[in-house]
Amino acid sequence: MNTLGANEEGKLLHRLRKGDRTAFEIIYRGYGELLYSHAGRHLDDQEEAKDIIHDVFFNLWQNRETLHIRENLKAYLYQSVRNRVINHQLKSRRADRYIRSFQHFLEKGQADTDFRVRESMQTELIEREISSLPNKMRTVFELSRKEGLSHKEIAKQLNITEQSVRSHVKGALKILRVRLSIVILLVSMIVI
């Protein structure tokens, strides 16, 4: 059925306000497909277009007694569809932004968690390797690297020469580089 004339619309609106279902059906058949086409052109989802049209007509029926249509029925229905399409698009964009933001959060959180796990494992391995050094070498190394003492201060505290301190630190670094480079590589491969 083509669109209704202005005189016919007026009579149908009067009947609709009184609860005449036949008038409602005539309006639906007269404008339903046109409104669906209009909504469908602006939405990617045809099911959403159908939902919008059903919602417009549902609201038309629900609010029939209080309708104040100033122009014509066709303009009122098109405006209702237009508003719902715009609302849907805005909600969809907000939902897309939220989803992207949430995905970024999850990915970043996952990366942070992976980093912390690897860092914790590496710290534990380093500590284990340091503790496996010979006693004197371990003590000198910890005073140098953990306590931040100079070679001179370590030599004085342990009553050894500065040359001995340098030898112990150099030996500890050499042992740790070999042991830790292999272990840290393995940990990185396991966690990734």
Image: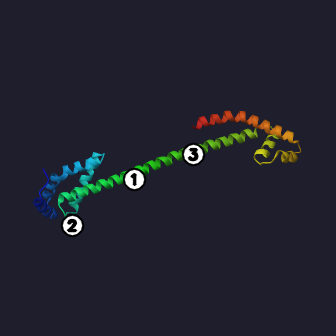
Task: Residue at 68%, 39% (x, y): give it.
Answer: 125
Which quadrant would residue 26 be assigned to in this image? bottom left
Foreground mark, 1 or 2, reads: 1
Q: Residue at x 53, y 46 (%)?
A: 108
- Asked whether the residues under the numbered discs 1 and 3 touch, taking CB atoms below 8 Å apart as contact, a structural biologist would say no
SS under mark 1 = helix
Q: What residue sits 20% from the left and 58% below the top? A: 75
Read off the residue under disc 2.
66
User: What quarter of the picture does the C terminus occupy?
Assistant: top right
Residue 170: x, y in percent? 79, 37
The answer for how far apart the CA atoms under marks 1 and 2 are is 33 Å
Q: Residue 89: percent from the left, percent from the top?
A: 33, 52
The residue that appears at 67% across and 35% down in the rendered structure is: 183
List x then y, in percent, for residue 156. 88, 47
Instruction: Find residue 163 and report its horizontal and vertical position in percent.
Output: 86, 39
| Marked residue nearer the N-terminal end (1 or 2) | 2
- Residue 126 appears in which quarter of the rendering? top right
| 112 sits left or right of 177 in the view | left
